[in-house]
Image (cartoon, grey):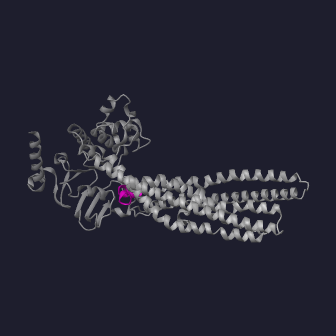
Amino acid sequence: MMIDKRLINLCKDSKKYINFTVLVNWISIICNIGIITIIGNIINDLANLNVIDTRKFIIIALFLIIRFISSLSSGYFSYKASSNVKVTLRDMIYRKLLKLGLNYNEVMSTSSIVQASIEGVEQLEIYFGKYLPQLFYSLIAPLTLFIVISFISIKSAVVFIISVPLIPISIIAIMKIAKKILKKYWGIYSNLGDTFLENLQGLTTLKVFNVDDIKHKKMNDEAENFRKITMKVLRMQLNSITIMDLIAFLGASIGSIVAINEFLNGRLTIGEVVVIILLSSEFFIPLRLLGSFFHVAMNGIAASEKIFKLLDAKELEKENFNMKNELCDLNINIKNISFSYDKERKVIDNVSMKFAKGTFTAIVGKSGSGKSTIASLILNTYKVDNGKILFNSIDIDDLSFDNIYEKITLISTNSYIFNGTILDNLLMAKDDATKEEINRALELSNLKEFINTLKDGLHTKTGENGNLLSGGQKQRLALARAILSNREVMIFDEATSNIDVESEELTLDSINKLSKEKTIIMISHRLQNVKNADKIYVMKNGKVVEEGDHHTLLSLKNEYYKMIENQKKLERKEAI
């Protein structure tokens, strides 16, 4: 009943601790049976005016000590059964996200992943630590009690054992309803998380356009839906607990009444009746506790469906081939590739390009021409529909992401600056970087002069996504980090599009310096930025329509020339 084999197999270390938990719980109930049986004998001795053997109290004390140790052990083994679950599952989620790369949000939204990784995994901790041990213990405990009570009163034992299955039957019936409700609960919860995260990230935009009240109302409506589904879940839990309590009390009452009737007919002693009445609760307590853990575990199972959806997502990761030697002096050759995001409209149409070692190559074109898609394909973020991308003579599909990322780095307008210090962000590229290497990266990125003006220097805080730095400073920090990583090929994807003119000039100066020692691929809509390139590819509607250096393309007076003239006109208008 609600045993997810795949989930259990993911956390194999938990199995033995689940077994240990069941064992010590069983020892604990044996101690309870022993204590209650001795109490029944003492009551019989009192009823018959017999002298009570003091050794019985010593035995009771020993049983209590063993039960106390068993209870402590149960808590310890329960913790061990679940302690690795959180680490294991979150590690698997993290590794999966690394393999999916930038495409992870095609599988699941960011907030849904956060919710599944935090609250969902927490719920699964209870599933492993509490629910599963209680499930197996709930099967053993009633059978043990049935055997013991059958030696006293077979009629009472039969009543108890018949009543016990009614609790799991009620749980199974509730489970069918609970699955639907909890699936809906997690869906609404994820939607609310998506809305909240989106509104938080776009708060400034909402204020600028004065639509924050509209979004606020929408989020309130979603919050109200979440409140309603939460109350529905709680109502379902309360009703199911009430049903299980009724079954437990009714079964215990009927079994106790049968025992009392046996006593009145002279077939049981007063001590035996007391033993049956006291043990009657032990018949139902394990399953009653199972019912309590069931609801939390059910929530965890619902969350695990989201986790498995992520873990089962198709990825481009391949075997980790060791091709370091074959990729030395890297030349990238794109041959007649075509690509479509939706498999209908072609974004890249029969494109061929070459990026020779040590050259400065630019890709230009209007927005939507397919420039940035080329960068994504070179990084193997997406797989081409037709054609080939060769790294030297090796097909990109025969390379792992590690092979590719060891050779190529990307600097884009969206390069992320992590919360921490400037030094923290730099050392992400190379954690053992020397002072000389860091200084060189700062000099090449034109960031050193700025660092020297800071009170804390390299230990200056950057803030979340570098919000304590200007746009230009963030971009130059991303560039310095890329330089420190010392990759052979550097791709600049609109790296100067969101920064001021001064910062843009500094960044372009850095790129020109780097072009003397690295293979540079620059994607830009600003044509003045690429005039020093060895070769320029001009794209339009997913095709390469022109190629050559700046002067050659100008002399053709075609697409590139028209783009240059249009940009000059726009710049003159802006200057007026």
Q: Is residue 357 above or below residue 426?
A: below
Closer to the camera in the image, 98 or 452 = 98
The magenta segment is 99-110
Residue 375 location (% of width, % of height) = 28, 55
In the rendered structure, the answer to whether residue 108 lies left or right of residue 299 reads left
Based on the picture, tell me whether residue 426 belongs to the magenta stretch: no
Closer to the camera in the image, 342 or 424 = 342
The answer to which quarter of the image holds residue 380 is bottom left
Tag count in the figure? 0
Do we see residue 285 in this rendering? yes
Based on the picture, tell me whether residue 105 belongs to the magenta stretch: yes
Residue 71 location (% of width, % of height) = 69, 52
Closer to the camera in the image, 391 or 496 = 496
In the rendered structure, the answer to whether residue 355 lies left or right of residue 129 reads left
The answer to which quarter of the image holds residue 279 is bottom right
> Which residue: 81% across, 66% down?
263
In which quadrant of the rendered image does the C terminus lie? top left
Q: Is residue 222 above or below residue 339?
A: above
> Which residue: 50% across, 58% down?
235
Magenta stretch, main secondary structure, is helix
Do we see residue 145 in this rendering? no
Residue 197 location (% of width, % of height) = 36, 49
In the rendered structure, the answer to whether residue 257 lies left or right of residue 533 reads right
Residue 96 location (% of width, % of height) = 44, 57
The answer to which quarter of the image holds residue 22 is bottom right
In which quadrant of the rendered image does the N terminus lie? bottom right
